[in-house]
Image (tube, helix red, strand yellow):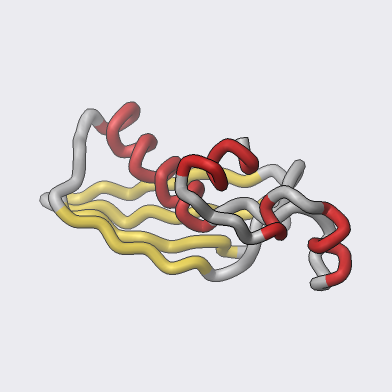
Amino acid sequence: MLFRYSALTFNGHRIHYDRDVCTSEGYGGLVVHGPLLATLLLDLLRIEGGQVPRAFSCRAMAPVLEGEDFTLCAAPTDGRADLWVRRADSALAMRAEATL
């Protein structure tokens, strides 16, 4: 999925598909794209909440590595939703907000 998302988005950064580069840059594995995590959050809103946002913004906070578990979370309220990605170690990987 990481390699395909790299191709789809024309992202040639090797930390998403070359483990040797990841190791040399201090990562413990391939790095999951921030935009991929944002896309998954948008899908969460669309599939679980039945809504496509009018506006969306996000900020990556910490990397998610290949093979690590993570949880997509959403807290919708009137006209908006707070969203976030939580890693298995409880670190906040991404936070986002959407206007519905």
Tell me which corner region of the image, top left, top right, bottom left or bottom right, holds residue 20: bottom right
Task: Tell me which residue sits at (72%, 57%) in the image.
Answer: 89
Task: Tell me which residue sits at (46%, 48%) in the image.
Answer: 9
Task: Tell me which residue sits at (56%, 47%) in the image.
Answer: 6
Residue nearest the viewer, comparing 89 with 29:
29
> Relative to 27, is 85 on the left or the right?
left
Residue nearest the viewer, comparing 1 with 90:
1
> Relative to 32, is 84 on the left or the right?
left
Q: Quadrant of the N terminus?
A: top right
Q: Position of residue 52 (x, y in %)?
A: 20, 39
> Relative to 50, is 13 on the left or the right?
right
Q: Position of residue 78 (x, y in %)?
A: 13, 50
Task: Tell me which residue sits at (80%, 65%) in the image.
Answer: 27
Number of marks: 0
> Relative to 34, is 81 on the left or the right?
left
Tell me which corner region of the image, top left, top right, bottom left or bottom right, holds residue 96: bottom left
Q: Position of residue 32 (x, y in %)?
A: 63, 51
Q: Position of residue 34 (x, y in %)?
A: 51, 57
- The answer to whether 82 is drawn above or below residue 39 in the figure is below
